[in-house]
C-alpha cells in the first residue's frame, strides 16, 4: 500500500509578490507606525485590549483620562475593575475589558516587577492578550519580527493574493511567515492598516487610486469583469 507524499508548496511567486507589495507600500506610506498612542509598553498593552471592536482614535481619547488617573502599572493594578470600567466604557465591552486590564496589570506587578515581559510566550500568558496583541508588543516595543493579523491585514492579503481565502487570523499569520522577510513583518502590517483605511476599505475599495492595482488579484478580477461586461 503506497502512501501519498505531500508535495512541497511552491511559494516562489508569492514571495516575489510580497516583496513588490512591501516596496510599493513603503513608497506610499514611508512612516509606518502604530496608530495607538503610548509612552510605555504597559500602556500599549492596555490600549490594544481596549481597541477590540473600537477605533484607535477613540481609544487614544479614552486612555488620556485612564493614564492620567493611573500613571503606572502599580497604580492601575491597585484600581478596582469597576473604577477602570467607568473610564473605559466608551470603548465598548467595558466590563470584560476592565476585568482583563486589571488582571493583566496585577500579573505584571506580582510576577514581572511591573515590567512587560519580552517573550512571545510570556505575553500570551497575560490576561486578555492574544496573538495579535503579543505580536504588536514584540514588533513595536521590542523590535522583534512580528506579524499582526488584524482585519485590515486579513482583508488585504486575501484581495492582493498573498493568501487564498484564509480568514482565521492565526492561519493568515502562519501563511505570511512563509513569504515575508521577518524584519519587514511589523511595518508591513502597519502599512496594511493605513492602506486599508485610506484606499482598500472593506465596502468599496478604490482600486483606481491604489498603488497596488497593477499587482493585485482583486483589482485584476474587477478589471476582467468590467471588460467582459462591456
Image (cartoon, helix red, strand yellow):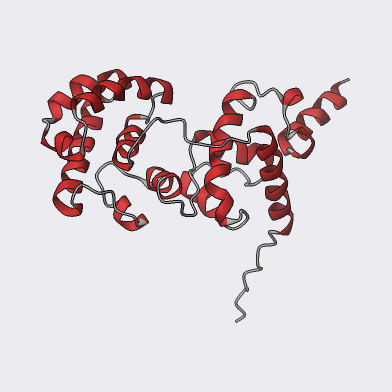
Residue 170: % across, % down: 46, 49
Q: Quadrant of the C terminus?
A: top right
Q: Would you say residue 92 is visible in this rendering?
A: no
Q: Quadrant of the N terminus?
A: bottom right
Residue 208: % across, % down: 76, 23
Residue plotted at (87% across, 26% down): 227
Indicate whether 128 appears above or below 67.
below
Q: Would you say residue 206 is visible in this rendering?
A: yes
Left or right of 188 in this view: 210:
right
Residue plotted at (51% across, 36% down): 33
Residue plotted at (20% across, 39% down): 73
Indicate whether 143 appears above or below 203.
below
Left or right of 192 in this view: 41:
left
> For residue 84, which quarter of the picture?
top left
Residue 149: % across, % down: 49, 42
Farthest residue to the bottom: give it: 1
Residue plotted at (18% across, 36% down): 102
Indicate whether 189 appears above or below 81.
below
Number of numbered callouts drawn: 0
Residue 123: % across, % down: 31, 51
Amino acid at each position: 500500500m503506497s502512501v501519498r507524499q505531500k508535495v512541497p508548496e511552491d511559494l516562489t511567486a508569492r514571495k516575489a509578490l510580497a516583496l513588490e507589495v512591501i516596496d510599493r507600500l513603503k513608497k506610499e506610506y514611508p512612516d509606518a507606525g502604530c496608530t495607538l498612542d503610548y509612552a510605555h509598553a504597559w500602556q500599549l498593552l492596555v490600549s490594544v485590549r481596549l481597541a477590540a471592536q473600537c477605533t484607535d482614535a477613540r481609544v487614544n481619547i479614552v486612555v488620556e483620562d485612564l493614564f492620567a488617573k493611573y500613571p503606572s502599572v502599580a497604580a492601575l493594578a491597585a484600581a478596582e475593575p469597576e473604577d477602570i470600567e467607568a473610564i473605559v466604557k466608551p470603548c465598548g465591552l467595558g466590563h470584560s475589558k476592565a476585568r482583563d486590564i486589571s488582571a493583566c496589570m496585577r500579573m505584571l506587578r506580582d510576577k514581572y516587577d511591573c515590567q512587560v515581559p519580552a517573550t512571545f510566550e510570556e505575553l500570551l500568558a497575560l490576561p486578555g492578550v492574544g496573538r495579535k496583541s503579543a505580536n504588536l508588543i514584540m514588533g513595536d516595543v521590542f523590535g522583534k519580527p512580528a506579524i499582526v493579523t488584524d482585519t485590515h491585514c486579513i482583508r488585504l492579503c486575501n484581495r492582493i493574493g498573498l493568501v487564498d481565502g484564509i480568514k482565521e487570523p492565526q492561519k493568515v499569520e502562519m501563511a505570511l511567515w512563509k513569504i515575508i522577510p521577518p524584519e519587514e513583518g511589523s511595518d508591513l502590517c502597519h502599512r496594511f492598516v493605513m492602506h486599508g483605511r485610506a484606499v482598500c476599505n472593506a465596502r468599496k475599495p478604490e482600486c483606481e487610486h491604489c498603488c497596488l492595482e497593477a499587482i493585485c488579484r482583486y483589482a485584476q478580477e474587477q478589471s476582467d469583469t468590467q471588460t467582459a461586461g462591456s
